[in-house]
């Protein structure tokens, strides 16, 4: 009878423990869905794991995005300490690498245990229970590491089962937190990009179409990525009453290229109002860009000054795609080739002016970046400057707006349904007939 009673009490005790654990698991699962902050979530996961197995201390590690290490963040007062371990190093690193749970009854008797943490903190580690955190697909996303079972008994099989059950809830909560963080970061990035684009649009001429004396001018600038490194500008109020026109291209794409473009624009506008000729202006722009340019980066730039009455053109080309000058009288095209190196590579280059030109009635000057000349079907042939020239000649008698529309249409027809994979800038200056 006594044996039967003892057996019954033992069974009831195990059942009570099981119910208690289930209750803790439900509480922990609920708690894990109360926060989307990853730092706070690590603490909630640790609380649920530690309470469930009755551990004195513990750490929750997460697998890094590149899968090469595990990391955790520990808050001590107002200070946050981040721990990072290579995959396979230490007990937690071994669990993250193999996916096998490790249970140690005497830490100091195990060669895998690193006692240096105890020496730093003054804490004495006895038992260790280290188990993987797996997501719904069974992939390892982190590690539970629990220290010192409260009471005399060490960690048990039931403790391992509890962590296995908690694992999926922890992994799901981490995934939700990361998705939330990504969404917040994307929203912030989108706002920053929108702000950058707004600023860049303000940098462009207020009116993409303008007239200046005998000249008609039209320009377009389209972004390939979030921001553009292409640049065009119309500069009025310059010495001698001439109009400045510039087209440039910063190597690369995105925000860095956009910032360099903005800097170059500011330099060009400032120096062009104080110097009568273009070569010294280009020298100054170049020398001011060099200190701020990242290694391997550069900017190409074509700039010209045009007299609104005579059509006389002074120009300098810092390795920009050679503008095309259409002569109505002959139906031919002249190329205004480079007169110096690209900007931002080295100081004291010494830019020179090209041979002076004059826009006669009906003549048109096309300035462009390689966004149109190098457009192509992926893996296919470039549209190229020769085709661009032929297309320009075919529509050069039309208005600047129509010229740009026709050039874009011909280039788009060349690449077919594919998207242009570069910033696109076109400027047409035409002298009225």
Image (spheres, rainbow, N blue to C red):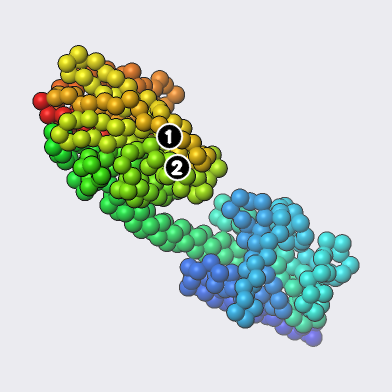
Residue mark closest to the camera, 1 vs 2: 1
Image height check: is 244 above or below 358? Answer: below
Name the disc covering residue 351, or none: 1
Q: Position of residue 276 (x, y in %)?
A: 31, 42
**Which of the 4 image quarters holds residue 236?**
top left
> At x 29% / y 20%, what residue is drawn?
334
Element under label 2? helix
Q: Which residue in the protein does label 2 denote?
A: 286
Element under label 1? loop
> At x 71% / y 54%, what residue is drawn?
87
Q: Residues within 10 Å of mark 1 (few under 14, many from 20)?
A: many
Q: How crowded is mark 2: few (under 14 residues within 10 Å), some or many (20 or more)?
A: many
**Which of the 4 image quarters holds residue 278?**
top left
Q: Where is residue 317 in the image (x, y as percent from the top left)?
A: 38, 31
User: Which quadrant: the N terminus?
Assistant: bottom right
Q: Is residue 160 visible?
A: no
Image height check: is 395 above or below 421? Answer: above
> Quick one: label 1 or label 2, which is nearer the N terminus?
2
> At x 17% / y 31%, what residue is drawn?
310
Front in this rendered view, residue 89 or 401: 401
Front in this rendered view, residue 208 or 77: 208
Q: Position of residue 88 (x, y in %)?
A: 75, 54
Q: Where is residue 150 in the image (x, y as percent from the top left)?
A: 74, 81
Query: Total label count?
Result: 2
For the residues labelled 1 and 2, say whether their Cβ atoms are less than 8 Å apart: yes
Disc 1/disc 2 C-alpha distance (Å): 9 Å
């Amino acid at each position: 009878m006594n044996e039967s009673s003892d057996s019954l009490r033992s069974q009831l005790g195990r059942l009570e423990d099981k119910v208690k654990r289930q209750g803790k698991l439900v509480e922990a699962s609920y708690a894990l869905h109360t926060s989307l902050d990853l730092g706070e979530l690590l603490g909630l996961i640790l609380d649920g794991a530690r309470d469930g197995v009755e551990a004195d201390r513990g750490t929750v590690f997460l697998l890094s995005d590149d899968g090469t290490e595990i990391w955790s963040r520990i808050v001590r007062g107002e200070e946050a300490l981040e721990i990072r371990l290579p995959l396979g190093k230490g007990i937690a690193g071994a669990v993250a690498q193999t996916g096998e749970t490790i249970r140690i009854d005497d830490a100091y008797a195990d060669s895998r245990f690193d006692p240096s943490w105890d020496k730093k903190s003054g804490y004495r580690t006895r038992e260790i229970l280290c188990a993987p955190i797996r997501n719904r697909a069974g992939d390892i996303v982190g590690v539970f590491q629990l220290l010192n079972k409260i009471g005399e008994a060490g960690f048990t099989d039931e403790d391992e089962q509890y962590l296995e059950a908690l694992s999926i809830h922890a992994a799901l909560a981490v995934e939700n937190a990361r998705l939330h963080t990504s969404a917040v970061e994307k929203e912030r990035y989108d706002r920053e990009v929108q702000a950058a684009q707004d600023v860049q649009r303000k940098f462009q001429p207020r009116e993409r179409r303008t007239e200046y004396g005998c000249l008609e001018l039209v320009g377009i600038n389209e972004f390939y990525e979030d921001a553009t490194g292409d640049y065009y500008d119309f500069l009025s109020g310059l010495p001698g009453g001439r109009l400045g026109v510039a087209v440039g291209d910063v190597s690369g794409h995105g925000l860095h290229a956009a910032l360099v473009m903005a800097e170059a624009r500011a330099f060009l506008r400032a120096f062009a109002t104080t110097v009568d000729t273009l070569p010294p202006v280009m020298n100054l722009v170049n020398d001011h860009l060099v200190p701020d340019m990242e290694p391997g980066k550069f900017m190409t730039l074509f700039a010209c000054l045009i007299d609104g009455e005579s059509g006389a053109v002074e120009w300098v080309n810092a390795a920009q795609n050679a503008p095309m000058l259409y002569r109505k009288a002959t139906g031919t095209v002249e190329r205004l080739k480079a007169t110096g190196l690209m900007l931002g590579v080295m100081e004291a280059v010494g830019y020179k002016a090209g041979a002076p030109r004059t826009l006669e009635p009906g003549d048109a000057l096309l300035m462009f970046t390689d966004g149109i000349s190098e457009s192509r079907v992926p893996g296919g042939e470039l549209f190229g400057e020769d085709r661009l020239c032929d297309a320009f000649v075919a529509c050069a008698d039309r208005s600047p707006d129509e010229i740009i529309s026709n050039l874009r249409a011909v280039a788009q027809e060349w690449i077919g349904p594919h998207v242009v994979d570069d910033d696109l800038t076109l400027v047409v200056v035409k002298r009225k007939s």
